Amino acid sequence: MKQIKLAMSALVLAMGVGGGAANAATNTAPTLSPADFEKAKTMYFQRCAGCHGVLRKGATGKNLEPENTLKKGTKRLSRIIELGTEGGMNNFDDLFSKEEIDILAKYIQMEPPVPPEMSLQMMKDRTKEYIAPKDYPSKPLHGRNWENFFVVIERDAGKAAIIDGDKHEIVAHIDTGYAVHVIKGTEHHKTGHPDDAIGRFWYTIGRDGKVNKIDLWQTPDKMLVAETQMAYDARDIAVSGDGKYVIAGGYWPPHFVIMDAETLEPLKVVSSRGVNVDGEYVNEARVAAIYTTPNEPTWMVAIKELGQMWQVDYSDINNLRIDQIDSAKFLHDGFFDPTGRYFQIAANASNKMVVVDTKERKLEKMIDVAKLPHPGPGANWIDKKCGPVGATTHLGIGEVSVWGNDPIGHPDQAWKLCYTVETDGAGAFIRTHPDSQFVWADQLKHPEVEIQQSVQVIDKDTHEIVKTIRVTEEDGKVALHMEFNKDGSEVWVSVWNRTDNSNPTGEIVVYDAKTLKEIKRIKGLTTPTGKFNVYNRANHKT
């Protein structure tokens, strides 16, 4: 916990205590000591701001401004934080003590402190280059099959682990920003260095806005080659198709930043504040997701609270072209169809999957799905009836929604629900592989421990759940996020210990993708969350 607090110190100090505490001093609002206020502020940032917003105006989660929270009072709010809700909010009784829950319940009845902005010069001042591009090796220095590496988020340790997928061995633990949310690699050749290869370089984005560049050809002790900070709170990152630029999006400040892909030097800042699809100005309009379009020189940038996809053309960053595409709120995670033309993204609050035609740069369709869709990295496969399909899990209900996504070959099925599968619990991630018969879905959002700790396997042909796998039975742990190895013969599932400590008690469980039997447990990891196979991610294998 000490390491996490250190990682968050910049934001905590920047946000201050006096203003928030003073503004909250009304006749009905509770009060906190300066120490408890600072503690609650850090807790809120780490565990609550992602869904409810820094300013607590709500998005995937409810609005938590004092006008709403004061009506409930400390006792009721504490109970909600402790037990969670059926709508998808986690229980926090295994993460926070009763005293911590009490001060957090009081904190969200007080006026939220407003953090500062971040200038381009501040970002440049925080940019560090550990190894110059001219000194990059011309071939891998470790003798391993780096294309079958897994790059793994170790959330609460503020690290990324590199794991050898052939040998099931941890190669390195690399220091990153706090609670890395996404790690993305280069997807094309010509990334600015003559000896590059697809998937060689990977870029992390932490909750604290820290960006790290990782070179998988280096020896383990030198894989971290550069870093910067582009926000105080952030979620996603992407590399341009030509390999020249990296873009990262901020939750706070609400903006995106374009950086030099070689050095991570920040080059351009673009605010995401604006008018939403309802005609209202939104100050905290956060960048939720960013993806590189496979066929166009653009990024897809999801502006969460605006309900807009911004298609950003990077072919001339000095004269930046941005197509603002209205859709629905609140945009979150997405993925491309197999052709790379259509981008499919969840609009959580609207219970829709939004489809954008990246060739025409316009809205293609909005598909009605179940409560709070959340596909994570998503899943595409071929269905016997509907042809190519895409799918999502849901945070609010145990259901997988499957729709047709081939308007050329199967126009009658395109952008319509093909079928749904009822699962035991709400989940956040779904994954498959072109060479696999099965689709895997987690259930970490269900309140029952046994279901949280299990994943379900769905047959692509029968649409039936063929197996429920109890991944762990250890107290305080959940199973989440699946990823296939390079050839699709294995499925890796994370086991995440939700308590904050420095002990590496998390693990990854490796399963045979055909027999569904356990092969091995890779231990020595701290809250492993997302994991990304180099070959599959670089080549869009879903």
Image (tube, rainbow, N blue to C red):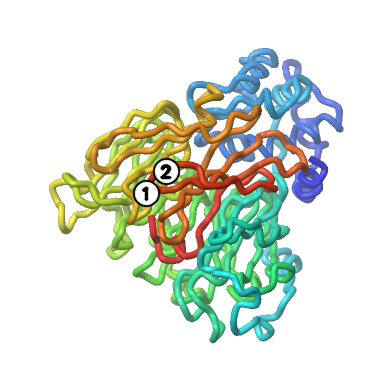
On residue 246, the disc is none
Q: Tell me if residue 325 can be seen.
A: yes
Q: Is residue 11 left or right of residue 537?
A: right
The residue drawn where x is 27% and y is 48% is: 389
Element on which disc 2 rests: strand
Label 2 sits on what residue type? Answer: Ile
Q: Quadrant of the N terminus?
A: top right
Where is 74 relative to 177, above or below?
A: above
Q: Residues within 10 Å of mark 2 (few under 14, many from 20)?
A: many
The residue drawn where x is 69% and y is 35% is: 44
Q: Residue furthest top?
A: 75
Residue 274 image offset from top left, x and y in percent = 49, 50
Label 1 sits on what residue type? Answer: Ala
* Residue placed under numbered mark 2 in the picture: 430
Q: Residue furthest left?
A: 412
Q: Quadrant of residue 201?
A: bottom right
Residue 408 image offset from top left, x and y in percent = 17, 58
Q: Residues within 10 Å of mark 1 (few under 14, many from 20)?
A: many
User: Whole-Å distance between the Cαs marked 1 and 2?
Assistant: 6 Å
Mark 1–mark 2 CB contact (< 8 Å): yes
Where is 198 relative to 279, above or below?
A: below
On residue 379, the disc is 1
Residue 71 image offset from top left, x and y in percent = 62, 15
Of the pair 59 and 441, the residue shown nearer to us: 441
